[in-house]
Amino acid sequence: MSSIFTRIINNEIPCFKIAEDANFFAFLDINPNAKGHTLCIPKKEVDKILDLEEETYMGLMAFSRKVGKAIEEALDCKRVGITVIGLEVPHAHVHLIPLNEMKEATFQSKVKLTTEEFEEIAAKIRAKL
Ligand code: 5GP
């Protein structure tokens, strides 16, 4: 069965999309550590990030860098943290987290956003790409 992220790419599950190219896709995390918390994924479904082919791994990092720079420009944050975990969803992904405080990097403090807030944040980031 396809991962939840493959179903997002295929438009079977809605998301707040940030960017897409031939090989990669970025969208807002539905349970964010901070406003603008974004996930970047390869379209090819591979569970662990270190199991990606090197070209895909490097491409994912370049794509994440581009999206991360747009987040930094669009939102009020000291910097964008980059994290890889993957314990919940078995489809390689990079977390880009706009950081002002260390707790936002811990995955233990979450923010609740309305649909309108998600849409507004996604539009702000897209405008900087
Ligand atoms: P990890 O696998 O790195 O531990 O965490 C997976 C991340 O994906 C979590 O931060 C979680 O909030 C996010 N996530 C899980 N399911 C969905 C979903 O259906 N849509 C979105 N946008 N994010 C999701």
Image (cartoon, rainbow, N blue to C red):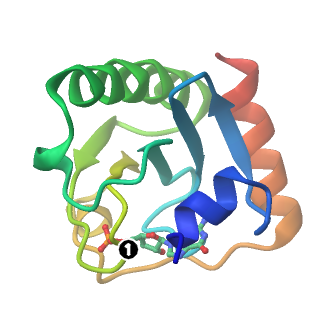
Q: How far across and how far down the image is residue 58, in percent?
A: 23, 21
Locate the C terminus by quadrant.
top right
Which residue is painted at 52% across and 78% down in the image? 1
Label 1 CB sits under 8 Å from any ligand 1 atom: yes
- Count of numbered tags: 1
Pick the front one: 3 or 125: 3
User: Which residue position is annotated with label 1?
Assistant: 89
Whole-percent x and y of residue 113? 70, 73
Q: Residue at x 19, y 58 (%)?
A: 48
Residue 14 position (above or below residue 125): below
The image quarter containing residue 77 is top left
Q: Residue furthest left?
A: 50
Q: Position of residue 44 (x, y in %)?
A: 44, 44
Residue at image point 35% right, 52% down: 93
Mark 1 Cα shell of 10 Å, populated few (<14), some (14-19), many (≥20): few
From this viewpoint, which residue is outermost toward the front?
1
Q: Is residue 118 above or below residue 49?
A: below
Q: As drawn, is 89 to the left or to the right of 21?
A: left
Quick one: SS at disc 1? loop
Name the one closer to the observer, 113 or 83. Answer: 83
